[in-house]
Image (spheres, rainbow, N blue to C red):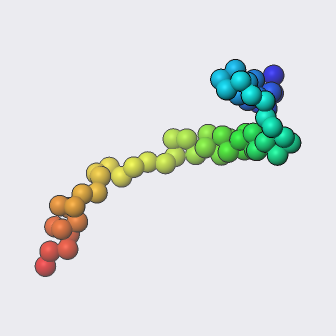
Amino acid sequence: MSFLAETEAMIAAWHGIAPPNAAARVMAADLVATIRAFEAVRGQMRFEDEPASFEAALQETKE
């Protein structure tokens, strides 16, 4: 089953509706590219080792 067909089936199962028009189907199909873009950067984005804090910022600006 294609992603679009799966998405439409999930919408029907969870909400009891079908996509209202062709534009809705296009938007659902565009989700494939968005999901793949997020998957491509998975594991590459990291938070800083130490989270920023107000106290740390104050200490850095002290004279």
Give x and y (percent) for residue 36. 68, 41
The answer to which of 22 and 63 lies nearer the viewer is 22
Is residue 17 visible to the viewer in this orientation of the structure? yes
Q: Residue at x 75, y 39 (%)?
A: 28
Q: Residue at x 70, y 20 (%)?
A: 13
Give x and y (percent) for residue 33. 72, 44
Tag count? 0
The answer to which of 14 and 28 lies nearer the viewer is 14
* Left or right of 55 in this view: 4: right
Q: Is residue 20 above or below residue 2?
A: below
Give x and y (percent) for residue 53. 24, 57
Q: For the view shown, which residue lies furthest in the bottom direction?
A: 63
Is residue 25 visible to the viewer in this orientation of the structure? no
**Quadrant in which the N terminus appears:** top right
**Quadrant in which the C terminus appears:** bottom left
Give residue 29's quadrant in the image: top right
* Left or right of 11 in this view: 50: left
Q: Residue at x 14, y 74 (%)?
A: 62
Q: Residue at x 43, y 48 (%)?
A: 46
* Left or right of 2 in this view: 47: left
The answer to which of 44 and 16 lies nearer the viewer is 16
Q: Is residue 57 above or below residue 7?
A: below
Q: For the view shown, which residue lies furthest in the left direction?
A: 63
Give residue 24's quadrant in the image: top right
